[in-house]
Image: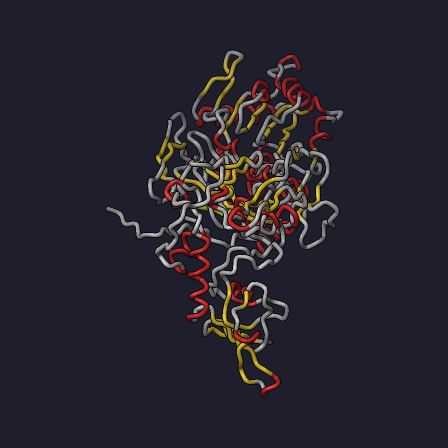
Amino acid sequence: MPTITINGQRCDFEQGRTILQVANENGIEIPQYCYHDGLSIVANCRICLGEVWAPNPRSGGAIEPFMGGKLLPTCQTPAGDGMVVHTDSPKAVRNQKSVMEYLLVNHPLDCPVCDQAGECFLQDYSYRYGRGVSRFQESKVKNPKKDLGPHVYLYADRCIMCTRCVRFTREVSGTGELMVAGRGNTEEIDVFPGVALDNELSANVIDLCPVGALLDKDFLFAQRVWFLRSTPSIDPLTASGDNILIEHNQGRIYRIKPRTNPAINKWWITDEVRYGWKFVHAQARLRSPMHRRFGTLDECDFSRAYHEAILGLSDAVQRGTRLALIVSPMLPCEEAYALAKLARSLDPEALLAVGPVPVEGHDKVLPAGADRDDPGAFVVCAEKAPNARGVRRVLQAVAGEGGGEGVLEFDDLLGRPDQDRIGAVIVTGNYPRAWAGSDLIDALRRIRSPERGGDGGFVVVIETLGSDLLDAANVVLPGATWAEKAGTFENARGMLQAFEAAIPVIEMAKTEGQIASDLLAMVTGRDEGEPGGRRLVVVDEQPGEVPAAATIAVPRGRLFNAGDMRREMAESFPSLRVFGTDVSLPTIEATQTPAMEVVEI
């Protein structure tokens, strides 16, 4: 294998790689602004220039200055066997200081109010490669702030003209809204007249910008980045399985950013995923269990809600009717398994069904005209549920091993000719918006209605957001969003990916897995709670600058753990052994490194 020496470090590489790519792959820092792995190479920032020496076959392979000894852009120069590269030599360092000085000539001194502060390459490189003193005495060129589209502001006087954003709109999204206008010190990024930066991937230019020129309207002045903690997670809204980072502080999400995964979403995410997390902190979140009393739903504690749920479901099954479980495709695989175990413990022949899977239009491939198998293409998924395949896989295993019917689709469950034989239903939601149609609500009301004879059926709804569906419930249990739990999603390509909880569950709510564990403990006689008592505990979010805490209900059964549940699934069912072998775990630990040491006083 060919080798190259960069700043004294010997590195193996594959033919076709550039010097900068080899350096990045081996952890050697070379300053870079315009280069990005997902974009074309233009070599216009010039800060990555280095001295390159290479074997000269005309002189018997002696190492000599390449191209006459002039500095070469390492991002564009192919690596060669036997090359020796210096980006820390006096000649290269002088270039780095000159480039930084030129970039800062017209740059405003507004770091204290800039959202990019703390993760700005201009700040970092100015400290590591700059002069530290400006010799510029003239007036700076000032440019106005521009509104580029629904999500992006442009602070043009901060721009260093790396053109990453322009190349992105031309090469990745294929929409070409951005251009370079003007020349010299009047050169600036702009949109074409009457064309806003408004495409499915528009906000990725914010991540691409190495300075504070392109800023997120939604995150503007919301939080300092050094207070944020990042948790690796998975797209909770579509079947794409995009890898993301949840950035949060004090139990509140502030932004979602893409996490690099070349096999799935590469370096990008859609605006839908980036801004679709607002339901986590919605005012409509359910924060307390409810039970039906005198024809209306009243708040109660978990102890009462659990006992009424078990009693109502068990009575319906003992009367000879069947229990139906509707598992939302928004839930992780581990919680689907726990709920299926609960349903089969109440009724060995319980009907297992997958909740409705929203689909909006058709998959869209960007840029337009690209093939979806193209390594550079990005697919916007039309299926708006992250785990329909995973839920179906788990329920099919439980249904196949436990006897009875197979897994039903949501429409098939509603259209059953023997629907009148269903006397108990457990419904899970967790959708980011209202999802239950009038057909489901009417069917649940018919099941609950005493007009069918006897005491009527019993309906338990486990939901995160308030909706008309609650009107059909006997007992309502507040669930948790994906950001508040751990689990596994299976995307449209059949890839199983695990994710971890980022923030604590809101007060007086529980994850669906914990609810299932609690109810199962009561059904099997392993209830560890205190009937009739309200047991609460204060749980810290996690160590941080300013820790946040929430008062939650203590589990009545075994504490639900997604890793333990995956192990149990793999050991219990041969068809679920993939959860012990094929689940992709997050491999990137995202941390924010402060510029100064923070100590506790």
Which quarter shows the N terminus? bottom right
Using the rendered view, name the quadrant where residue 39 is placed. Answer: bottom right
Front residue of 261/491: it is: 261
Q: Residue at x 51, y 75 (%)?
A: 84
Type of colouring = secondary structure
Front residue of 498/409: it is: 498
Residue 568 shows up from this direction: no
Residue 123: horizontal and vertical position, in percent? 41, 52
Using the rendered view, name the quadrant where residue 545 is placed. Answer: top left
Horizontally, residue 416 falls left or right of residue 154, namely right
Q: Residue at x 58, y 41 (%)?
A: 190
Front residue of 546/290: it is: 546
Using the rendered view, name the quadrant where residue 322 is placed. Answer: top right
Residue 205: horizontal and vertical position, in percent? 56, 45
* Furthest-front residue in this view: 138
Q: How many discs mark residues in the rendered view?
A: 0
Residue 384 shows up from this direction: yes
Residue 45 lies, with reference to residue 256, above or below; the image says below
Residue 203: horizontal and vertical position, in percent? 56, 41
Horizontally, residue 412 falls left or right of residue 307, namely right
Q: Residue at x 61, y 45 (%)?
A: 179
Front residue of 178/374: it is: 178
* Furthest-left residue in this view: 601
Residue 52: horizontal and vertical position, in percent? 52, 73
